[in-house]
Image (cartoon, rainbow, N blue to C red):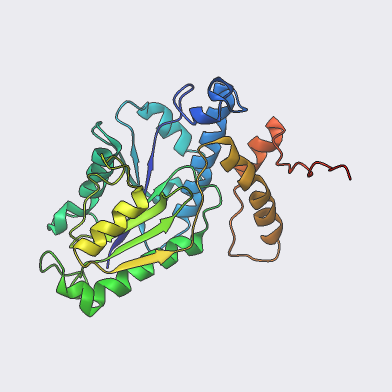
Amino acid sequence: MKKAILVFTKVPRVGDCKTRLTEARGGILTYEEATKFYEACVLDVIDVCLSVENADFWICYNKEGDRAYLDNLLTQVTHPERIAGVFSDQGGTFDECMQYASDYILKSGGEERLADAILISGGDLPTLQPHILVDALNKLEVLSKSEAGQKVALSKVQADDGAWIGAALVEGSCQEGGFSLVGQTCTTKFDYYSVFYNVNGITALDRLATKAIEEDLPLAYVEQVPDIDIPVDLASQVPMLSVIEHAAKFDDSLMVPRRTITILNEMGIVSVALPPEKTQA
């Protein structure tokens, strides 16, 4: 089965990235610092994705993003030659943009498809690790070959090895009912409409699960990877980054998000826990 990993991201631009971390919105960073932080995260995430050798790597960026700036940014990743392609979404809601990115790669299982299965990641997951991506891709393939996956496949599509591609979904959660990773095969009856934006206020994770249940789709779950949207997210991950940095000295499979750690150190960002107030007897 031909697999693809895709990072879905905005092109970093001051005033347009991680604004909920900024002082203007009750956070702790300036707009410039928030942009530098996001830029570091994106580059670290891309490096992790590029380390997975059994999958092509793609980038989908926002329609209004500066492609020239993005191209220059990508020269800084460890293996830019492994990038299979870069394309922009077509604007609209987040649902519509995610759907476009997925369709661009999978082509509804048509012969012109760029992969048989896709795994989509955000760019704000600095603790993402290669083994999580590999686990997600492996689970997609296993479910695709399962009786349940073969039964609900949208169409008869064969992989290069002659195996029939069954339906399968995989997801990894983040905090507050969202997900960090989501993937599917090209024969899976699933779309992103109403996943992120719905009138009933259902979380994205719940909506994904509901769609899978409604269509009886086989679904796999992988290790949670938190994203960073608000100050408490950042505070939670600062010690996690320290753990990864030290643990990597004893575990070659771990990748240290060095750019993210460096920018946080340069800005003097630390995580603290306030001691409990003393009560008088």
If the image is split into quadrants, where does the C terminus sit? Answer: top right
Query: Residue 251: x and y, percent?
Result: 65, 66
Q: Nearer the viewer, residue 77 or 125?
A: 125
Q: Quadrant of residue 173?
A: bottom left
Work out whether residue 189 can be spotted.
yes
Query: Residue 25: x and y, percent?
Result: 53, 24
**Quick check: 129 above or below 37?**
below
Q: In this view, does 90 lie to the left or right of 279?
A: left
**Quick check: 124 above or below 54?**
above
Q: Is residue 220 left or right of residue 254?
A: left
How many numbered callouts?
Answer: 0
Query: Residue 222: x and y, percent?
Result: 44, 64
Name the residue located 31 percent from the left edge and 59 percent from the top edge. Answer: 209
Name the residue located 76 percent from the left edge and 41 percent from the top edge. Answer: 274
Q: In which quarter of the image is residue 62?
A: top left
If the image is split into quadrants, where does the N terminus sit? Answer: bottom left
**Quick check: 187 above or below 202?**
below
Task: Single out the residue that lies furthest toward the front.
Answer: 281
**Quick check: 92 above or below 210?**
above
Q: Nearer the viewer, residue 26 or 59?
A: 26
Task: Single out the residue that lies furthest toward the bottom.
Answer: 147
Name the residue located 49 percent from the left edge and 31 percent from the top edge. Answer: 18
Q: Which of 80 and 139 is in front in this view?
A: 139
Work out whether residue 118 can be spotted.
no
Query: Residue 137: x and y, percent?
Result: 37, 65
Q: In which quarter of the image is residue 87?
A: top left
